[in-house]
Image: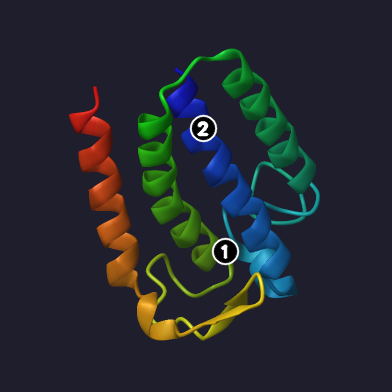
């Protein structure tokens, strides 16, 4: 059960981060998150998603999970995290054009991140999770 909430936690985080990156039009037209209930198409607002995130963290803390399976769930969830984040920002679920970015002071070339690497991460995470059952 903890793995499900770990997965959900990452998805919720992707929704909230996508909202942060979205412009004002994208914030009103996506179906996942809105500033206030009744303002956009979504039925859950930013703080509602944050409450779900906290609930997931609480349940995860109460569950005993194996490290390797937790790692696999994080890989699987990352695929959906990226997809939802890019969907909310109006770029579609599979983002075609990643740009160079900096992570913790390290410049990372965009050639290492494409929709293909997202799908590969989903496949590898699923295989690891199934093999470790």
- Toward which corner of the image does residue 128 lie, by quadrant? top left
Q: Residues within 10 Å of mark 2 (few under 14, many from 20)?
A: many
Above or below, 90 against 87 in this view is: below
Mark 2 vs mark 1: in front: 2
Q: How many marks?
A: 2
Q: Quadrant of the C terminus?
A: top left
Tell me what residue is drawn at x 52 percent, y 28 percent. Answer: 5
Q: Please, what secondary structure does the residue beneath circle 1 have?
A: helix
Is 77 above or below relative to 54?
below
Tell me the distance, in whole angstroms, between the alpha carbons under discs 2 and 1.
Answer: 21 Å
- Residue 21 placement: quadrant: bottom right
Q: Name the residue at 45% across, 20% down.
A: 65
Q: Which mark is residue 88?
A: 1
Q: Earlier in the sequence, mark 2 or mark 1?
A: 2
Q: Residue at x 39, y 48 (%)?
A: 75
On the question of residue 97 being in view, the answer is no
Compared with 100, 21 (above or below) is above
Q: Is residue 69 left or right of residue 104?
A: left
Image quadrant in which the N terminus is located: top left
**Residue 73 coordinates in the image, percent (x, y):** 39, 38
Say which residue appears at 36% left-offset and 31% top-offset.
69
132 versus 11 height, above or below: above
Query: Measured from the top left, where is residue 79 in percent x and y?
Result: 39, 55
Q: Position of residue 2 (x, y in %)?
A: 49, 21
Residue 20: tell me if it is visible: yes
The quarter of the picture where residue 131 lies is top left
- Assess disc 1: are there few (<14), some (14-19) or many (≥20) residues with their C-alpha within 10 Å of its C-alpha: many
Q: Is residue 8 left or right of residue 118?
A: right
Residue wearing tag 2: 6
Residue 34 coordinates in the image, percent (x, y):
72, 53
Q: Please tell me whether mark 2 sits on a helix, a strand or a loop.
A: helix
Quick check: 21 left or right of 124?
right
């Amino acid at each position: 059960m903890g793995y499900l909430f770990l997965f959900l936690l990452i998805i919720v985080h992707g929704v909230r981060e996508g909202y942060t990156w979205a412009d004002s039009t994208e914030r009103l037209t996506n179906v996942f998150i809105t500033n206030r209930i009744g303002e956009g198409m979504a039925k859950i607002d930013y703080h509602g998603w944050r409450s779900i995130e906290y609930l997931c963290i609480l349940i995860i803390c109460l569950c005993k999970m194996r490290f390797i399976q937790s790692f696999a769930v994080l890989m699987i969830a990352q695929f959906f995290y990226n997809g939802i984040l890019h969907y909310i920002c109006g770029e579609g679920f599979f983002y075609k054009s990643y740009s160079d970015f900096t992570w913790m002071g390290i410049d990372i070339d965009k050639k290492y991140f494409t929709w293909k690497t997202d799908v590969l991460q989903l496949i590898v995470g699923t295989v690891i999770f199934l093999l470790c059952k």
